[in-house]
Image (spheres, rainbow, N blue to C red):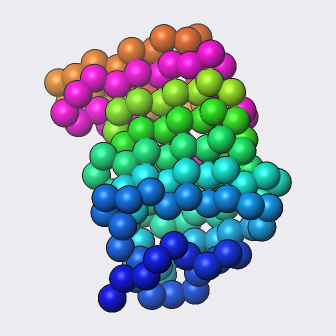
Amino acid sequence: GSRGPPPRGGWTGGTWTGQTSTLQVYGAANFSLPTSLSFTPNDILINCTPGTVEISFPDLIGAGGTLTVTSGVAKLLGGLNYAKDVVLNGGTINCFGASMQFAVDRNWTHTSGVFTAGTGTVILINTGMDGTISGATTTTFNNVTIVKNGNSVYWNNGSTVSGTLLLSFG
């Protein structure tokens, strides 16, 4: 069955179905989403000062979904995390572990806030339309892989890669 939004502080099991909705995490509490959770919201909005939301499972956001961080910390743990678009407009996105891969299908917008790259990789997939790296704040990525599937990726704001930039033509 379905449930409403997860309880404050974390969720230990069950299924939450929200294919056309937004999971909004507010407040000051830390919040953890475990790997065993069946979880498919369309969008996630993190606005929790000074809280931290730990995310550690694949297929984080359903097709067409956006990860938006306006305050607090989104802590992406190991494995593959996925979002159609990323909007960092305050707060922090932390990427932990060399095995951490963050696949972004379309746009990365960094208006304000902090992106901590760690030792992981951001993969820009761009399936179906062009993508952009943009925003008023530049991003320093550790490793970036751009998988060009017949579309373009526009790097518009002077963001940099401190490790490896890999270009792949699929």
The image shows residue 157 at horizontal and vertical percentages of 55, 12
The answer to whether residue 79 is above or below residue 46 is below
Query: Which residue is at the front of the view, 91 or 159?
Result: 91
Residue drawn at 54 percent across, 43 percent down: 68
The answer to whether residue 160 is above or below residue 30 is above
Magenta segment, which residues? 113-140
The image shows residue 25 at horizontal and vertical percentages of 62, 60
Query: Which residue is at the front of the view, 161 or 42?
Result: 42
The answer to whether residue 105 is above or below residue 62 is above
When asked about the image quadrant of residue 110, the answer is top right
- Quadrant where the C terminus sits is top left
Magenta stretch encompasses residue 124: yes
When asked about the image quadrant of residue 84, the answer is top left
Query: Which residue is at the front of the view, 131 or 67?
Result: 67
When asked about the image quadrant of residue 38, the answer is bottom left
- Quadrant where the N terminus sits is bottom left
